[in-house]
Amino acid sequence: MTEKPVATDYRRVIWDRLEDIACPGEHQNIFGHDGALAELGHAYKSGKMHHAWLVTGQKGVGKATLALAISGHILRNPDIAMAPSSWISPELNDNTSIMIGRGGHPNLLYLSRPFDQKTKKFRSNLTIDEIRRTRAFFGTTRGENNWRICIVDTADDMNASATNALLKILEEPPERTIFFVLANSPGQLLPTIRSRCRQLHLRPLTNDDLKSALEGLDLDLTSLDQPKLENLYRLSNGSVRKAIILLQLDGLELYQRFSEVLQENNSGSPHWLKAHKLAEELSRKNKEDHYRLILDIARNHVSGILHHKASAASVGKTNIRTEIDKAQSVLSYLARLCEVWENTASSVSLADSYNLDKKQVLLNLFGSLAQVR
């Protein structure tokens, strides 16, 4: 795979764009998804390309990058008989890639949360008006008898009206049309949407692939020693986006401070002085991104404990009574930990809705995590 972005970055307006980072479509860096690329390439070459693909995986794992890359492959090779059997990384000056990077390829429609010119903010949903853009798109003449491709990024963002509009199109797709419907949480989609798509799941990147992807985006990792690299890999959980955010927001230092808060003092309580200092700092208006990041770090912390405890519960054999007691103890602990996170999620939502004190949200979180240690 290539190791450098496409030489042109057009600074397109995208709702979740990361500062100073080339967007999907503006580069051809694909790491860790060879199997998915091979499946798509084979399906296209064999003439058995499904009209709709549900591309799933956690946020930041490369779903949009993959969809745009395979779209370029199809648009460069409209004649299936002449197409290569697998995706091939294009040259830097490839015209199709450049048009996709600009967001201006006539045969590719990319749908995501729109920018509201009145409020000067991005909409919170992928609206039905966005889905309706497919009417004009499919109504145009295909350039050079090519395919027309629509990418929905992401289906998680669609409201009910948009979901129903998309379903109607998937039920009666136009000729020579391919949909790539991206989803972080496919289980929350309508079963009718899932049933009309062929699912392609992208796994989290390995540490080596994650490192290659970050370096391919010109991020310098040389200043990180091995312990910091390991923390970066663990906190990123195979997501390039998470890793970038951690690097941009000094997330490794934030994780260290989070860990220090939860270290028990002589009374078994969290370090409240550090807790108040950290919560006070992250509740400021200019620290919104850091506030969201500490919540993500806490979520990762809870997820790690849940996974570890659940795995440990099945280790060892003594007698039936001992195993039952151990299982009940672990289940009770896991239930309390899940309750902590449910309460935290509810507090975060209330604070967002009514502009409540974020400091108290964090202090409650620290205290609750300490209680279920």
Image: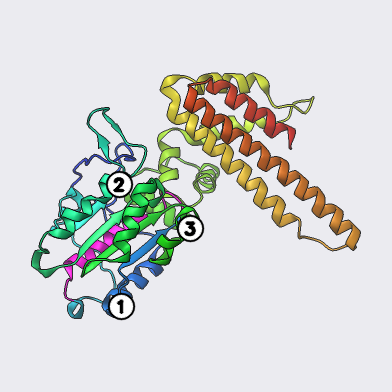
Magenta residue check for 88: no
Span shown in magenta: 58-79
Tell me the amino acid under the disc marked 2. Ile
Q: Nearer the viewer, mark 2 or mark 1?
A: 2
Secondary structure mostly seen in the magenta stretch? helix
Whether residue 232 appears in this view of the structure is yes
Magenta residue check for 70: yes
Q: Nearer the viewer, residue 332 or 370?
A: 332
Q: Earlier in the sequence, mark 2 or mark 1?
A: 1
- The quadrant holding residue 177 is bottom left
Q: Which mark is residue 247?
A: none
Q: Secondary structure at mark 2?
A: helix
Q: Marks 1 and 3, Cα distance to the nearest angstrom?
A: 30 Å
Left or right of 114 in this view: 234: right
Residue named by callout 3: 206
Residue named by callout 2: 128
Taking the spot 18% from the left edge, 71% from the top edge, the residue there is 77
Q: Is the residue marked by circle 3 packed among few (<14), some (14-19), or many (20+) residues within 10 Å? A: some
Tell me the amino acid under the disc marked 3. Thr
Residue named by callout 1: 48
Residue 185, image x, y percentages: 47, 52
Q: Marks 2 and 1, Cα distance to the nearest angstrom?
A: 30 Å
Q: Marks 3 and 2, Cα distance to the nearest angstrom?
A: 37 Å
Q: Nearer the viewer, residue 250 or 114?
A: 114
Q: Earlier in the sequence, mark 1 or mark 3?
A: 1
Residue 362, image x, y percentages: 59, 26
Taking the spot 76% from the left edge, 56% from the top edge, the residue there is 313
- The quadrant holding residue 363 is top right
Q: Nearer the viewer, mark 1 or mark 3?
A: 1
